[in-house]
Image (spheres, rainbow, N blue to C red):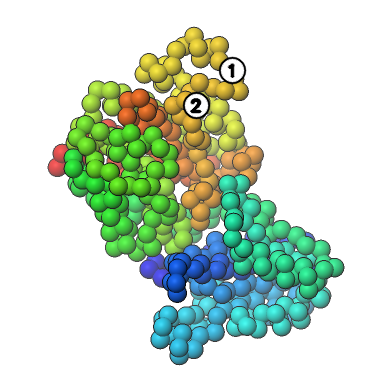
Amino acid sequence: MKYTPIDPALFVQNRRKFCKQLKPSSIAVFHSNDVMPANADATMAFKQNNDLFYLTGLDQEESILLIYHDARDPRMKEVLFIRETNDQIARWEGYKYTKEHAQKVSGISTIFWTHEFEQVLNSLILEVEHVYLNTNEHLRAVVEVETRDSRFIKWCQQRYPLHKYERNAPIMHYLRAIKSEYEINLIKQACAITGRGFRRLLRFIKPGVMEYEIEAEIWHEFLRNRSTGPAYSSIIASGANACILHYIDNNKECQDGDLLLMDFGAEYANYASDLTRTVPVNGKFSKRQRDVYEAVLRVMKAATQMLVPGNTLDQYHAFVGRVMENELIRLGLLNESDVRNQDPGKPLYKKYFMHGTSHFLGLDVHDVGNKYRPFEEGMVFTCEPGIYIPEEGMGVRLENDILITKSGPEDLMKEIPLEADEIERLMAR
């Protein structure tokens, strides 16, 4: 792995929290993700299942975690299965975990090879009543391939049809929403790398540069700082491209006089960061561009102050909508009378600001969590308002990552340039 070793106390702590949520007489199973095929004999880069990583710290394929907290044999309360290596694997693929290394990373002392899983499971599962299995239950997930989890669910239910089956996902969504101090420090590291990337770009952006050249600079800075790369596909959108919310073609030339919207974030130790900045390609905002920029910045600052314990996403977004209405009226994009008489179910501001302001952030950039759960200390959210004006060929979005604390919101990206004057000053160097 590119990242430095993580204290295994994080994963020991996470498993302890998970076990407290289980019913008595239960076994829980977590699988790594598959190595996904590309074409011919190629494969895509491996990305670990984030639930398995959260509980073990293992970053390798063909890994399985079995948790049997009530086991009478204390050695079987936590069991880890890893891929057995050999000389051929070592020669072609490189290093794989030894049992000793996996124990050091995870804090789990009982470790078998993956091919021993069925035998070990059978020796334990007949003692329990409940079996907890894992699935991807993210609200936005569209899963069109059969995953390792899906195959195991079929196999397990066919082989052990009389057990009571439970879902890991609700427990994991509940636990992963609150970040420990260990996790917050990893997210801060991801944010710091992202900040270095942005400062690099401010020296690089100018008329005539291609969007993909800017993306290349991001990759360069991320990799040289121990990131595995962007946490998601980077959006490098100049001019009217900024009005396409998920624009990732990144293949246009940046023109003099245009704004450039950049939405990117480094991943570090599987933890995501998520930044958006909008800058003038020529280093100087026009009057209209600055007016729109400042409007978005005011909404961002007001929204950030609402990220406090006790609020909910619905209350928060309703507040942000009212602030945005006022800014759009000030910009001449909405009429005050029309806003006063609008259908509450179809607010007019959605024409220029059509997405949510915040989402959970953690191991996934759109991290798991319940939208109806009141904000709590330790949650991390993005804050990302925007105004998109296709008829003017302009889109402005600003985004920072915010930690909720008992004393108020903590901006994890406060060191990254945000004010229009600072952006211009840095680009003028």
- 327 lies above or below 158: above
Q: Mark 1 sits on what residue?
A: 343
Disc 2 marks a residue whose amino acid type is Lys
Dot 2: what SS? helix
Q: Measuring 59% from the left and 56% from the top, which residue is drawn there?
A: 144
Q: Is residue 221 left or right of residue 10?
A: left
The answer to which image quadrant residue 414 occupies is: top left
Q: Measuring 32% from the left and 29% from the top, which residue is drawn there?
A: 393
| Viewer-closest of 223 and 13 | 223
Any part of residue 93 in sight = yes
Of the 4 image quadrants, the one containing the C terminus is top left
Q: Measuring 51% from the left and 67% from the top, which residue is drawn there?
A: 36
The answer to which image quadrant residue 49 occupies is: bottom right
| Viewer-closest of 375 and 31 | 31
Any part of residue 188 in sight = no
Which of the numbered marks, if any, corresponds to residue 350? 2
- 301 lies above or below 24: above
Q: Mark 1 and mark 2: span between their CA atoms?
A: 12 Å
Q: Residue furthest left?
A: 429
Q: Residue furthest front?
A: 40
Q: Is residue 243 left or right of residue 363?
A: left
The answer to which image quadrant residue 257 occupies is: top left
Q: Is residue 157 left or right of residue 269?
A: right
Residue 79, percent across and down? 65, 76
Dot 1: what SS? loop
Q: Measuring 28% from the left and 55% from the top, which residue is drawn there?
A: 216
Disc 1 marks a residue whose amino acid type is Asp
The disc, 1 or 2, on the residue closer to the chain's N-terminal end is 1
- 3 lies above or below 244: below
Residue 413, percent across and down? 37, 45
Residue 113, percent across and down? 60, 83
Which of the numbered marks, if any, corresponds to residue 114? none
